[in-house]
Amino acid sequence: MRNLEKDAREMAERRERMLSEGFRIFSQKSIEVVTMQEIAKASGLGVATVYRYFRTKATLVIAIGAKIWKEYAVEVEKMYQARGGDAMNAAEELAFFLDSFIDLYQNHKDVLRFIRSFETYIRYENVPEEDVRVYNEVVDGFARKFHAVYEKAERDGTLRLELPEKKFFYTILYIMLSASEKFAEGLVYPSEYEEDMTEELELLKDMILKKYSV
């Protein structure tokens, strides 16, 4: 008789290994050039096994993206509570939101490299929106957190709400995320001697806060 509990545990372990090895390889190389055979070999599995878990490469890539954002959301929530949580005013929460990008750059460059490659891959492959839904749902969690900041600013007046909420959120998101991704990949250096771009991200943060804080 098969041990169903053991089978389920082994299946979960195999899936986790594929996600972990996939993330490691995808964050080191461009996603486009990595094959499922490479993922299988790194995971110690046959390629047919990988395809039983993930029917396409895009399915694997999306599962990895959702996983890393879920894990980072847990970290962000811990940092948020350590910083004072809901007791912060809207301007302080915006500063925290900006600091989360700096934290990504300082401590999770592999995540930033993966995200940059992910965005290019999804567009290039014309992956259907429905297939990306599980990833977008996780990312939307950050948008909901920002919505709470926007609502708080309407009440406490510590931010200038010159832009509609959606434009405000995506403007800041793209500025900080784009800069963080390029710095993490080493695509932008102001000089051959400077490799840590934290100061530049801090400057971006200060400029945004100066623009929108009352």
Image (cartoon, rainbow, N blue to C red):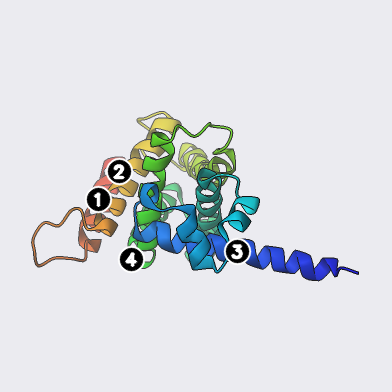
> Circle 4 is placed at which residue position?
106
Placement of the C terminus among the 4 image quadrants: top left
Residue 22: x and y, percent? 48, 59
Res 124 quadrant in image: top left
Residue at position x 47%, y 64% in the image: 83
Q: Earlier in the sequence, mark 2 or mark 1?
A: 2
Q: Quadrant of residue 16?
A: bottom right
Identify the mark nearer the N-term, 4 or 2.
4
Gap between marks 2 and 1 measured at Cα: 8 Å
Foreground mark, 2 or 1, reads: 2
N-term-proximal mark, 1 vs 3 = 3
What element does badge 4 sit on? helix
Q: Considering only order in the chain, which callout, 4 or 3, is on the residue closer to the N terminus? A: 3
Residue 204's disc is 1
Q: In x, y percent, where is residue 137? A: 58, 42
Decide: marks 2, 1 in contact (CB < 8 A)?
Answer: yes
Question: Residue 193: in sight, yes or no?
Answer: yes
Q: Earlier in the sequence, mark 2 or mark 3?
A: 3
Q: Secondary structure at mark 1?
A: helix
Three-letter amino acid code at disc 1? Leu
**Mark linked to residue 175:** 2
Could you tell me how far apart the alpha carbons at marks 1 and 3 are, in whole angstroms? Answer: 36 Å
Q: How many marks?
A: 4
Query: Marks 4 and 2: CB-CB under 8 Å?
Result: no
Q: Tell me if residue 200 comes above or below residue 14 in the rendering.
A: above
- Closer to the chain start, of discs 4 and 1, is 4
- At a point 39% along the width and 64% down the height, the residue shown is 108
Q: Residue at x 28, y 45 (%)?
A: 208
Sort mark 3 into few (<14), some (14-19) or many (20+) by Cα contacts within 10 Å.
some
Q: CA distance from mark 4 to mark 2?
A: 17 Å
Q: Which residue is mark 3?
A: 16
Which-is-in-front pick, marks 4 and 1?
4
